[in-house]
Amino acid sequence: MDDREGSFVAVRRISQGLERGGSVYSSSSPEGVPGSAAWLGRGLSCVCAQRRDSDANSTFDLTPAQEECLQSLQNRIDVAYDSTIPLHQEALRNLWKLAFPEEELHGLISEQWKEMGWQGKDPSTDFRGGGFISLENLLYFARNFQKTFQDLLRKQVGERSVWEYPFAVAGINITFMLIQMLDLEAVKPRTIAGATFLKFLSENESAFDILYCIAFKLMDQQWLSMRASYMEFNTVMKSTRRQLERELMMEDITHLEDLPSYALLSQ
């Protein structure tokens, strides 16, 4: 996925939940294998900047505490994933352990990664658009909302599509979408949603990670309600973004936990 548009693999739905053991996915067609080259680059792109013209000239002043929190989050965003850094390697191994505790990982480069929804056998190639923070988001999700994480990873809730979105790469798209939606690379927020989020961030340093978990679950709910398949992923992401923006602009929201979609998460 590049810095403005991302492509990912459509994962064919074989059964409810991942089938563990000798053969994880089976299909009569090679296109049924996650990561198959036949499903790369088919116009599936990340929902990026959608800031309205009316927002372009608006900025919101920040308190010193909010400025400090924003700078700290921007520093996280600026960290690229580097497969040569031991800390990054260990984070990736930990993600596997949390996702599939019953299965030993054979290596940081392995066909096993496709089971999680990476495009190929080397997840590091998918982090270009989301950076290290996108891995941190997935780790936070797996540690703090284990049931929801597993439900989404294994597609255990709802009537699923024959061609499902790939879990891991969808997660990177969500990180990137939130950065754009909240305008987090700007000096000051230029949207009400962005300004509201920074209030939450000044109260809770994990606010971005929490919002990520909310967004991921909300995206899956939208996916199911729209009965979407891989060609509708961008439409689902746009709908998810609009819903998050609406919730962030509600007058009675004082904490992230007050967002209606927060109730979708299960620990």
Image: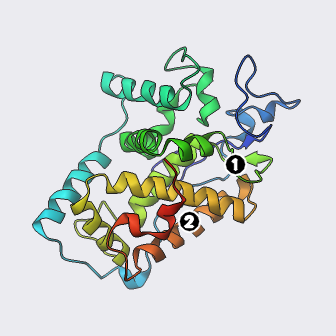
Amino acid of disc 1: Arg
Residue on which the image places disc 2? 240
In the image, residue 23 sits, relative to residue 249, either above or below, namely: above
Seen as rendered, the residue at the extreme right is 28
Amino acid of disc 2: Thr
Badge 1: residue crowd in 10 Å (few <14, some 14–19, many ≥20) = few
> Residue at the spot x=42%, y=82% of the render?
53
Distance in Å between CA atoms under marks 1 and 2: 22 Å
Image quadrant in which you'd find residue 187? bottom left
Horizontal and vertical percent position of residue 14: 80, 37
Q: What SS does tag 2 mark?
A: helix
In the image, residue 122 sits, relative to residue 141, either above or below, namely: above
> Residue at the spot x=50%, y=27% of the render?
96
Sequence order check, earlier mark of 1 and 2 = 1
Give the left or right position of residue 130, taking residue 9 as reference: left
Horizontal and vertical percent position of residue 79: 30, 41
